[in-house]
Structure formats: C-alpha cells, structure tokens
Image: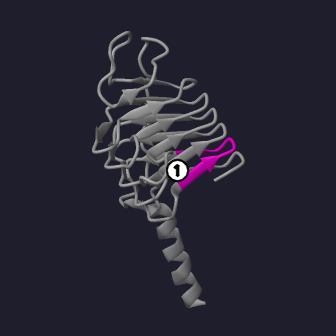
Amino acid sequence: MQEDSEISFWTGGYLNTIQGNGPVGVAVGLGSQATFFNSAQIGGHSSAGVDLYANSQGYFFGTNTVQGNGSGADARSAGVRVDGNSQALFRGGQVLGNSGPGVLVLVNSSADFSGVSFSGNSGVISCDASSTMVSDLTAPNSTPPAGVSCRTPHGLGGRQITKSQPAMPDWTEDKAQHDKYAKLAVKH
C-alpha cells in the first residue's frame, strides 16, 4: 500500500492469513495506514511480517499473530518493522518466533503497545537513537527488561483505546425485499 491509502483486516467470523509473500507480508508506506483487528495471522516472510515506512501507521488490536518472519541474512528482519517517521500501535496479540526483534523501530518512529505477548524473537523491541516506545513492559527511569533496547520519552503511559470491532451489517430486510422482487419477476 502506498500514497495515502488505507486497509483494514478484521474478523467477520473468518481468519485473515497473510503468509509467504516473499520478503514482506504487508508493506505500508508513503502516508498510508493498516489496521489489523482481531483476525490476522502474518507469517513466513524473509524480511518483515509488516513493514511500516515513510510516515505510515499500523494499528494492531486484539488476537493478531505475527510469527515466523525474517531471516538471519537480513539485518533489518523483524516481526514488525517501523521506519521513517512511522508509528505502530499495539493493543494485545502475539509476536512470536521472528528472526530479529519482535518490533524494530527506526528513523524518528515510535511504537506504543500494551498487552502484547512476545516470545521466541531475537529480542522484544529494538529502536535506533531517534526512535521511542511507550509500553507496559517497563516503568520510566528503570532498567528495561531483557530484549528491550528503546528509550521511553515520558512516564504518562500509552494511549487509551476505546475503538470496538465494526458490526456486521444486518441484511435481513434487503434480502426479504430481493426475494419479494424475485417472486414478482417470475409471475410476469
């Protein structure tokens, strides 16, 4: 995705599987935004499962899983790569078994997360000197937990999110009207 576009992956009772697409599973760049809401499984990519770059945003809410991405041959491998003045907001989910850190944050970018389960990655989150994180992993002014190499800009905590899953539309009335029309069309 590029140039101010937007996409949302959400469950309507189905799982969204993004698997084995080459170097990157979902590339979001140049001012674009992707939402993963309770239903995405992203895995099997040789560089990053999700690559947010060039002033873009990623919103991960709920039971998403980013697993098995990256390779030892790519120094920028990660479950989720956030680069070039971009942002990632995580509320829940799992980031597991990725080569490289679970989240790699570069060049004036930020990650805000809570309730995320990290395991089996080569580190939890890694930032360059220009990037930051806000999370429930560490308190301000304390030694970060193992696998965390990011600075925290303030002690105010992460953003409170109240967004809920979109409701499935009720097509009952439209379906009844269509059935009525179909019966009339057969009579004449």
**Residue at 38% from the left image edge and 53% from the top image edge:** 39
Residue 178 x, y percent position in the rendering: 53, 73
Element under label 1?
strand
* Residue 103, quarter of the rendered image: top left
* Residue 16, quarter of the rendered image: bottom left
Q: Is residue 133 magenta?
A: no
Question: In this rendering, would 144 be left or right of 176?
Answer: left
Residue 19 x, y percent position in the rendering: 43, 63
Magenta segment: 26-34
Closer to us: 5 or 111: 111
Circle 1 packing at 10 Å, graded few (<14), some (14-19), many (20+), is few
Q: Amino acid at mark 1?
A: Ser
* The C terminus - image quarter: bottom right
Question: In this rendering, would 94 be left or right of 182?
Answer: left
**Residue at 44% from the left image edge and 41% from the top image edge:** 60
Prevailing SS of the magenta stretch? strand
Q: Which residue is mark 1?
A: 8
In the picture as drawn, the residue positioned furthest to the front comes out as: 73
